Amino acid sequence: MKPIFFVTKPLPDIGIDRLRRVGEVRIGKAQGSLSEKEIVAGAADCLGMMVTPAEQITKRVLDQLPQLKAISTYSVGFNHIDVSECTRRGIGVGNTPDVLTAATAELAITLILSVARRVIEGDRMVREGRWRGWEPVDFLGVPVVGKTLGIVGAGRIGGRVARMAAGGFDMPILYSARTAKPDLERDCNARRAELEDILKQADFVSIHAPLTDETHHMIGETQLQMMQPTAILVNTSRGPLIDEPALIKALKDGTIAGCGLDVYEKEPDLAPGLADLPNVVLLPHIGSATMETRSKMAIMAAENLLAAADGKKPPHCVNPEIYP
Ligand code: NAP
């Protein structure tokens, strides 16, 4: 009998076609997050499930899917999956690192430039017909070239942002990570620092650490108070790394100058007041959203799912310890 795979949302065909060569594929709805009930109904009788960061794969979901052998997430982040519970049950979990690194790093740089140079405010003024012509003191932003960039979580994406910023914008780099990054230090003259020192010294702070129990709300009121009033904060990692109400307060009272966000605490909802602020740029979680990147992610996610469903270690595995 052919295995059945549940894919929670429509993905590029190139990935779905690979699954169809092996088994039957059920695809969830195109828009909006699936509820627990919809995930469980969709994945009933399935050997494997491909998910996105929009679905929460909790112990309760897993309890209702005892036949499941494989979970593949169409993302590098896997905070939406209870991995330790999967490991306990022998469910292989795969993710999609590397192929989205450049796209997400580009988006972090885009946010830095957009906030610094007030791109969205300017665009809005032109579109709304409020522009009256060149003015000597309108839309004064802050320069990016030569300013200090703090990278919180200098892994694949953070490291790439550092290289783009140092190479393209002559930005001195401060970084934090659990382990030292000698290549980054050698190639970009980057300096490892405590979070507190990064926040105090950087003109721009870009967040790239994964969402874990340890990093949840790692940027809250205390940390925002450490930043310079001219500083700009950018987050393309996961929303809950920042305490959103504290961020809104800091943006309102001038504790920091601006921020650019691709991710939010309670996606797709925004904390009250965030969208009313002029000094923020808000994107709809599009870090990896290029056709090239998403196609590569679809292939990788399909290969991970097929391997784990076949009892083999996925090529990109989050819980390799379950395999001999
Ligand atoms: P990665 O290579 O694992 O990098 C994460 C970095 O964070 C590592 O350098 C790690 O240190 C560091 N880190 C872990 N805990 C930390 C802590 N408590 N304090 C400071 N640094 C810490 O992951 P990645 O591929 O760069 O992806 C990073 C995150 O980006 C993902 O988890 C995902 O949530 C997010 N993401 C978002 C989008 C989007 O669409 N916006 C797209 C892709 C990814 P070590 O190197 O020492 O382990």
Image: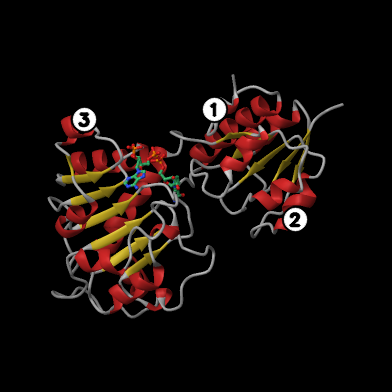
Residue 310 as seen in the image, left or right of residue 136 = right
Q: Which residue is mark 2?
A: 38
* Residue 71 seen by the camera: no
Q: What amino acid is labelled 2 in the image?
A: Glu
- What's the mark number on residue 320? 1
Look at discs 3 and 1 and give the one toward the viewer: 1
Q: Are marks 3 and 2 in contact (CB under 8 Å)?
A: no
The residue under the point 40% across, 57% down is 241
Residue 231 as seen in the image, left or right of residue 10 = left
Look at discs 1 and 2 and give the one toward the viewer: 1
Q: Earlier in the sequence, mark 1 or mark 2?
A: 2
Q: Residue furthest right?
A: 1
* Along the line of sight, the residue nearer the viewer: 214 or 267: 214
The residue under the point 21% across, 49% down is 194
Quadrant for the N terminus, please: top right
Q: Are marks 3 and 1 in contact (CB under 8 Å)?
A: no
Residue density around tag 1, few if under 14, some if 14–19, many if 20 or more, within 10 Å: some
Dot 3 lies on which element? helix
